[in-house]
């Protein structure tokens, strides 16, 4: 059976999860959980050959994460027997293990299109295309100040409906946030996006445009992906926000755009975000707030930045395979 592959990419907190839930409503599409294969597993092994024992462990872990989520504490030994049956060779490339995992899940769910929504897969597009030559990408872009606000409040997700998030992960999210770091991460992602504008297998979509006209944009996405549009796709629960409680109300929430204008960010955070991301904001037509003078607290944010960066490195040490990847893995 020949499957289609969709990768939803972009800067973190840019609507990738919302888009994945939209596609998961489609009768032919199966959306995988955010398992961070490429940035955590693929990068770690650098696609070197691994023995069957290691391959079984990795495949079992993938099955466990898909069943219970990234923060699952349940032992992946539950899938050791299944993984042993699926892996017969003595040596594997890590990407082979991932393909076996994906194809098993797709056949098990009787779906034709696989959808992945880990935002920082944007940094692994070439690796993904090598593995899945016919893959298509939806690159989500969102106003950097709304991303800033969402990242600032991301630590609250555990208390807004995402109870499975470990308390330590909430602390990590709190420590990670700083307007300079978050703006640099946004820049890093948008620079890649800018280079993808003329790629026929990449659809660049602004979060704001989609929310303002969801049906029209969803139909355009389906045309790009060569799948039929189904109206049920837009009937998704309003969950995943860093700013409001999860709700079972099914809607595309227009209040999520330009939330930064209403409250939550200081003028100093807005000033720094605009200063650092000025050129890319122009490229993607995001209008800037005007300042006559830099706000006073800018100096405070500059002074505490090295301290926040140090603690962020400490809290992310297990997620990094080379310091140069830190800005990508946050």
Image (cartoon, grey):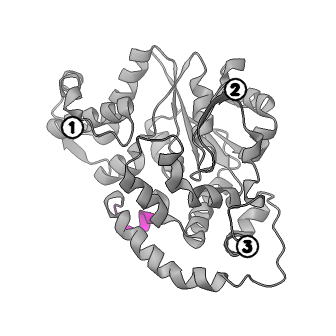
Residue 217 picture location, percent across and down: 77, 33
Mark 1 or 3, nearer chain start: 1
Secondary structure found at label 3: helix
Decide if residue 121 is in sight here.
no
Q: CA distance from mark 1 to mark 3?
A: 48 Å
Residue 164 in which image quadrant: top left
Q: Is residue 33 left or right of residue 284?
A: left
- Name the residue carrying label 3: 267
Q: CA distance from mark 3 to mark 2?
A: 35 Å
Mark 1 or 2, nearer chain start: 1
Label at residue 228: none
The residue range painted magenta reads: 321-326
Q: Residue at x 44, y 41 (%)?
A: 163
Residue 289 picture location, percent across and down: 82, 69
Q: Residue at x 81, y 67 (%)?
A: 288
- Name the residue carrying label 1: 57
Secondary structure found at label 2: helix
Q: Nearer the viewer, mark 1 or mark 3?
A: 3
Decide if residue 109 is in sight here.
yes
Residue 70 in which image quadrant: top left
Look at the magenta stretch and give its main secondary structure.
helix
Q: Nearer the viewer, residue 156 or 318?
A: 156
- Name the residue carrying label 2: 234
Above or below, comparing residue 110 to residue 25 in the picture: above
């Amino acid at each position: 059976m020949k499957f289609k592959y969709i990768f939803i990419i972009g800067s973190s907190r840019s609507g990738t999860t919302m888009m994945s839930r939209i596609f998961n409503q489609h009768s032919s599409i199966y959306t995988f959980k955010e398992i961070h294969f490429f940035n955590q597993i693929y990068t770690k092994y650098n696609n070197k050959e691994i023995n069957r024992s290691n391959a079984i462990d990795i495949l079992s872990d993938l099955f466990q994460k898909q069943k219970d989520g990234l923060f699952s504490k349940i032992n992946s030994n539950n899938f050791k027997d299944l993984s042993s049956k699926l892996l017969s060779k003595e040596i594997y490339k890590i990407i082979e293990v991932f393909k076996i995992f994906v194809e098993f899940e797709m056949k098990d769910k009787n779906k034709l299109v696989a959808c992945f929504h880990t935002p920082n897969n944007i940094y692994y597009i070439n690796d993904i295309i090598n593995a899945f030559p016919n893959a298509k990408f939806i690159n989500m872009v969102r106003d950097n100040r709304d991303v800033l606000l969402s990242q600032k409040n991301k630590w609250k997700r555990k208390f807004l409906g995402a109870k499975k998030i470990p308390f330590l992960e909430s602390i990590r999210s709190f420590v990670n946030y700083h307007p300079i770091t978050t703006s640099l991460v946004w820049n890093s992602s948008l620079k890649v996006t800018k280079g993808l504008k003329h790629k026929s297998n990449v659809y660049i979509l602004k979060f704001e445009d989609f929310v303002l006209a969801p049906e029209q944009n969803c139909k355009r996405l389906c045309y790009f992906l060569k799948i039929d549009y189904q109206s049920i796709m837009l009937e998704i629960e309003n969950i995943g926000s860093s700013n409001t409680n999860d709700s079972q109300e099914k809607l595309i929430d227009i209040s999520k755009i330009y939330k930064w204008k209403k409250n939550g960010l200081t003028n100093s955070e807005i000033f720094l975000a605009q200063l650092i991301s000025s050129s890319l904001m122009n490229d993607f037509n995001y209008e800037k707030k005007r300042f006559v003078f830099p706000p006073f607290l800018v100096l405070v944010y500059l002074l505490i930045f090295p301290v926040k960066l140090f603690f962020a490195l400490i809290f992310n040490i297990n997620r990094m395979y080379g310091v140069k990847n830190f800005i990508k893995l946050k």
